[in-house]
C-alpha cells in the first residue's frame, strides 16, 4: 500500500482481521438522473490525439454490408480486424466479415499495417468519409491503437453487449496520432485481494480501450502469493490461503495455465505483462511457506492483516542469505520462463528493518538472476539505494513531501534514492501516489481506499506532468531528466477494497467483488492517467478533458462499468448535488476551523490540507436548493451573518439562519462559487497562505473565489 514512512501521514498500526469470504455485489449507487444534459463535447476522444480535424463530406455509417478489410496476411493484423468485428457485433447486430483484399475497398473499415515507419510502433492515422474508414499504421499494434479511437467515434451504445437501434455513424474526420511515452501502465494488486482470471482479463480490456499498453501484476506480498512455482508447491498451498481480511482460502492463485491465459489475452490487446515478485520486504506469504527463509528456520503463520513493513527475508548470516538467493533463483527462473515480456519487477520498497548490507545482498541476488534470464530489472524507486544494472526501470511513487524537500538540507530518502538511480543510468516510470494511486479516495465520502497521500479527485489525477514529478514545487529542478522518463503507471492497491475502509473491517463489513471495486476506483481516473501518458503536454487541458471525459460515462454504463460519477465532471444526466462530507479548497489550501475550535464565532481561515475533521465540511441541501456547511469537528455551521464585503466568515451553532445558507454553483472548470444567500457575496480568501482570513466579497471571478469541493 506504500504508506509506511509518509511524514505526518502515517496511520496507526493495524491488527489482523480474519473474515469469511462472501463476495457481495457492489453497494455504491450512482447519482440520480435528471435533465438538462450538458452540451456534448465534439469528438470526445480520450486520450486526446496529437492532431484531429473535421473534413468536408458525408459521414460513414456501418450497416450489414460493411466489411473489415485488412491489407495484410499478417496474423496479428488480421487479429485486430477480428477483434474489431467481435467488439461491434453485439450492439450492432451485424457480423462484419473480415477480409484480406490486396487493396483498399469501398464501404469498409480498411486496416492497413503497411504505413510509413515514421509512425512508430503505436502511431496511426485515421480518416473517415462516406465511402469508408481507413486506419493506417506501421504494424498491427498501431492498428489496434487506432481501432480504440474508432470505437470512441461511434455512439456510446456501441459498447453494449446487446443489440441497440443505432445508427452507427462515424463523423468525417482526419486524425494523426502517436504516444508521448512508450510505457503506459496500470498495476493491479492481486496479492492483497485475489482477482479471478476473468476479472483480470476484464481489466485488461478496460485499460486497453484507453491505449494502456502494460499490465503490472503485484503477485506477491505479505497477504498472499499468487503465482504457482512447481518446485516450491508450498508457496500456493500455504501462501495463497490468505488475503487482506480473509483466511482459509483455496485456489487463490494462478496456475501456470492461468497465468499463460492472462498473458495471451494481454498479448491480443498488445499489452505487456510485468510480474512483480516483491522483496526483501512484503514477504510474509513466502516466510509462511518456506521455513528456511526465516532466521529460526520456522515458518511464520499466514498473514491476513493490513500492516506493512512487517516482514523481511532473513539476511543476518551467510547461510540464510544463501537460502534467499537459492529461493529467488528458483522463483525468478520459473516466472521468467512463463513471461515473454522484457521486465521482472523486484519490488524493493518498505524495508525499514534491513541494514544497508542486507538490502544490497537481496538486490544483488535478485538482479543477477533477472539479468541471467535476459530480463530488464524493474523495481520501486527504493531500489536506487543499492547497485542496479544500467538501464533498469524504477517506479517512483513519491508525493508532495518528497517534492517539497528537493534542494533542501533535509531531502527525503526517496529523493536520495532517485538521485542514485539516475546516476546509475536507470529509467523511471512515474507513479506519484498523490496523482497516480487509484486506491486513494476521491474525497472524504469515498467508501473505499485510503487517503494517506491526500484525496485524489479526477482533476488531481489529470493535472500533473511526468517531467515535474520529481521536481521542486514550482516545477523546476527536476531530478530525473526527461530522457530518462520511460512513462507513467496508474497503481490500484486492493487491501482496502471494502466499505468503511478508513477503519478496520468487522464481520459486518460489506466487500464488493474485486471488479466492482476496480470499476469505482479506476473510472474516471484511469482514463485521466492514460491521457497523461499518451498525449503531448501542449495538447492537454483540464477544461477540454472534463468535457470529453463526461461523454464516456454513457460508454461505461453501456459496457457494464459501474463507474463513480465524480464531482468536477459534467456527466450527462447526472444531478449536480454537492452533499455529504467534503474538503473545500482554493489556492492549494483548505477551508479550516483553526485548531478544531468548538467556540461560536471562531473565524474561518485557510490552512495546508490535513484531511482532518477541522477541514471536513458536511454539505446539506435544503428543499430550495441551497446548502448549509457544518464543520465535522465542531458541528457548527459556516455563517456569513449579514455583514458588508470583507466581513469574516465564522462558525456558529447550526440554526438554519439566513447567514448559514449558501448557494453553491459549479463553474466551467469544475470548481465552485460559494455565495451567501444573506449577502449575495461570495466566499473569498485574502491570500493563499496558511492562516489567511476567509471573508465574503463581491464576485470578481478571482482565483481565490473559486473552490474545489472534494
Image (spheres, rainbow, N blue to C red):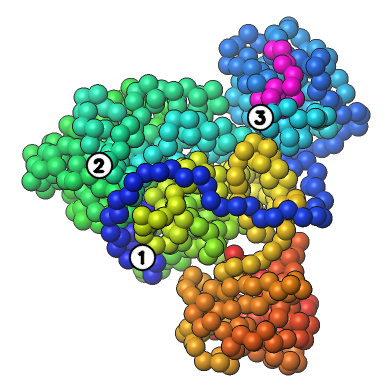
Residue 94 on the magenta segment: yes
Residue that appears at 72% across and 16% down: 95
CA gap, disc 1 to disc 2? 24 Å
Which of the 4 quarters of the picture holds residue 622? Answer: bottom right
Name the residue located 52 percent from the left edge and 77 percent from the top edge. Answer: 632
Q: Quadrant of residue 154?
A: top right
According to the picture, the residue beneath numbered tag 1 turns out to be: 10
The residue under the point 43% across, 65% down is: 401
Marking on residue 285? 2
Single out the mark in the foreground, 3 or 1: 3
User: Is disc 1 surrounded by few (<14), some (14 to 19) or many (20+) residues within 10 Å?
Assistant: few
Tell whether 565 sits left or right of 404. right
* Place of residue 235 in the rendered image (x, y in percent of width and height, measured from the top left): 24, 34
Q: What element carries label 2?
A: helix
The answer for how far apart the CA atoms under marks 3 and 2 are is 40 Å
* Picture quarter with the C terminus: bottom right
State the residue position of label 3: 161
Q: Earlier in the sequence, mark 3 or mark 1?
A: 1
Is 608 situated above or below 75? below
Amino acid at each position: 500500500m506504500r504508506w509506511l514512512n509518509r511524514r505526518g501521514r502515517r496511520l496507526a498500526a493495524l491488527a489482523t482481521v480474519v473474515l469469511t469470504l462472501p463476495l457481495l455485489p457492489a453497494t455504491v449507487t450512482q447519482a440520480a438522473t435528471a435533465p438538462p444534459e450538458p452540451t456534448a463535447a465534439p469528438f470526445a476522444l480520450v486520450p486526446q490525439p496529437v492532431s484531429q480535424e473535421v473534413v468536408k463530406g458525408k459521414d460513414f455509417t456501418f450497416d450489414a454490408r460493411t466489411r473489415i478489410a485488412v491489407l495484410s496476411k499478417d496474423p496479428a493484423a488480421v487479429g485486430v480486424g477480428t477483434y474489431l468485428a467481435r467488439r461491434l457485433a453485439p450492439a450492432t447486430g451485424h457480423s462484419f466479415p473480415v477480409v484480406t483484399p490486396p487493396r483498399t475497398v469501398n464501404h469498409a473499415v480498411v486496416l492497413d499495417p503497411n504505413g510509413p515507419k515514421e509512425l512508430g510502433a503505436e502511431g496511426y492515422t485515421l480518416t473517415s468519409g462516406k465511402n469508408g474508414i481507413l486506419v493506417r499504421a506501421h504494424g498491427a499494434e498501431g492498428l489496434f491503437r487506432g481501432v480504440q479511437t474508432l470505437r470512441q467515434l461511434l455512439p456510446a451504445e456501441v459498447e453494449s453487449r446487446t443489440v441497440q437501434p443505432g445508427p452507427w455513424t462515424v463523423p468525417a474526420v482526419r486524425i494523426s496520432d502517436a504516444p508521448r511515452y512508450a510505457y503506459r501502465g496500470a498495476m493491479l494488486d492481486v496479492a492483497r485481494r485475489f482477482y479471478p482470471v476473468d476479472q483480470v482479463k476484464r481489466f485488461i480490456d478496460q485499460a486497453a480501450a484507453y491505449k494502456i499498453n502494460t499490465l503490472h501484476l503485484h503477485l506477491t506480498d505479505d497477504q498472499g502469493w499468487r503465482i504457482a512455482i512447481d518446485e516450491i508447491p508450498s508457496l500456493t498451498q500455504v501462501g495463497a490461503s490468505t488475503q487482506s481480511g480473509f483466511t482459509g482460502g483455496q485456489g487463490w492463485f494462478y496456475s501456470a495455465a492461468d497465468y499463460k491465459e492472462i498473458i495471451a489475452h494481454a498479448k491480443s490487446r498488445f499489452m505487456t505483462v510485468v510480474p512483480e515478485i516483491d522483496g526483501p520486504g512484503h514477504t510474509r506469504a513466502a516466510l509462511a511457506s518456506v521455513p528456511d527463509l526465516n532466521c529460526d528456520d520456522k515458518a511464520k503463520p499466514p498473514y491476513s492483516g493490513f500492516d506493512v513493513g512487517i516482514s523481511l527475508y532473513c539476511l543476518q548470516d551467510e547461510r540464510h542469505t544463501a537460502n534467499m538467493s537459492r529461493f529467488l533463483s528458483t522463483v525468478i527462473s520459473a516466472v521468467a520462463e512463463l513471461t515473454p515480456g522484457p521486465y521482472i519487477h523486484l519490488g524493493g520498497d518498505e524495508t525499514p528493518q534491513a541494514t544497508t548490507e542486507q538490502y544490497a545482498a537481496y538486490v544483488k541476488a535478485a538482479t543477477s538472476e533477472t539479468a541471467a534470464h535476459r530480463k530488464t530489472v524493474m523495481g520501486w524507486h527504493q531500489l536506487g539505494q543499492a547497485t542496479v544494472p544500467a538501464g533498469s526501470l524504477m517506479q517512483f511513487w513519491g508525493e508532495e513531501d518528497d517534492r517539497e524537500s528537493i534542494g533542501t538540507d533535509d531531502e527525503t530518502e526517496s529523493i536520495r534514492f532517485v538521485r542514485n538511480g539516475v546516476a546509475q543510468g536507470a529509467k523511471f516510470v512515474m507513479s506519484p501516489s498523490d496523482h497516480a494511486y487509484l486506491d486513494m479516495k476521491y474525497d472524504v465520502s469515498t467508501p473505499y481506499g485510503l487517503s494517506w497521500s491526500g484525496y485524489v479527485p479526477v482533476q488531481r489525477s489529470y493535472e500533473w506532468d511526468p517531467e515535474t514529478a520529481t521536481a521542486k514545487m514550482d516545477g523546476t529542478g527536476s531530478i530525473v531528466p526527461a530522457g530518462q522518463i520511460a512513462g507513467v503507471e496508474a497503481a490500484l492497491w486492493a487491501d482496502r477494497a471494502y466499505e468503511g475502509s478508513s477503519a478496520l473491517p468487522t464481520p459486518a463489513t460489506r466487500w464488493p467483488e474485486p471488479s466492482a471495486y476496480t470499476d469505482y476506483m479506476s473510472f474516471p481516473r484511469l482514463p485521466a492517467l492514460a491521457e497523461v501518458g499518451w498525449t503531448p503536454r501542449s495538447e492537454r487541458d483540464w477544461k477540454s478533458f472534463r468535457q470529453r471525459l463526461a461523454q464516456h460515462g454513457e460508454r461505461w454504463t453501456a459496457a457494464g462499468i459501474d463507474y463513480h460519477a465524480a464531482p468536477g465532471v459534467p456527466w450527462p444526466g447526472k444531478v449536480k448535488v454537492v452533499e455529504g462530507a467534503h474538503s473545500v479548497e482554493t489556492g492549494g489550501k483548505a477551508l479550516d476551523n483553526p485548531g478544531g475550535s468548538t467556540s461560536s464565532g471562531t473565524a474561518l481561515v485557510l490552512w495546508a490540507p490535513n484531511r482532518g475533521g477541522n477541514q471536513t465540511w458536511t454539505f446539506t441541501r435544503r428543499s430550495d436548493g441551497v446548502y448549509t456547511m457544518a464543520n465535522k469537528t465542531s458541528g457548527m455551521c459556516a455563517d456569513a451573518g449579514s455583514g458588508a464585503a470583507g466581513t469574516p466568515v465564522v462558525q456558529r451553532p447550526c440554526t438554519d439562519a439566513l447567514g448559514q445558507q449558501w448557494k453553491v454553483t459549479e463553474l466551467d472548470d469544475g470548481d465552485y462559487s460559494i455565495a451567501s444567500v444573506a449577502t449575495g457575496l461570495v466566499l473569498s480568501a485574502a491570500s493563499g497562505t496558511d492562516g489567511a482570513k476567509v471573508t465574503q466579497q463581491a464576485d470578481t471571478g478571482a482565483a481565490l473565489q473559486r473552490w474545489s469541493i472534494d
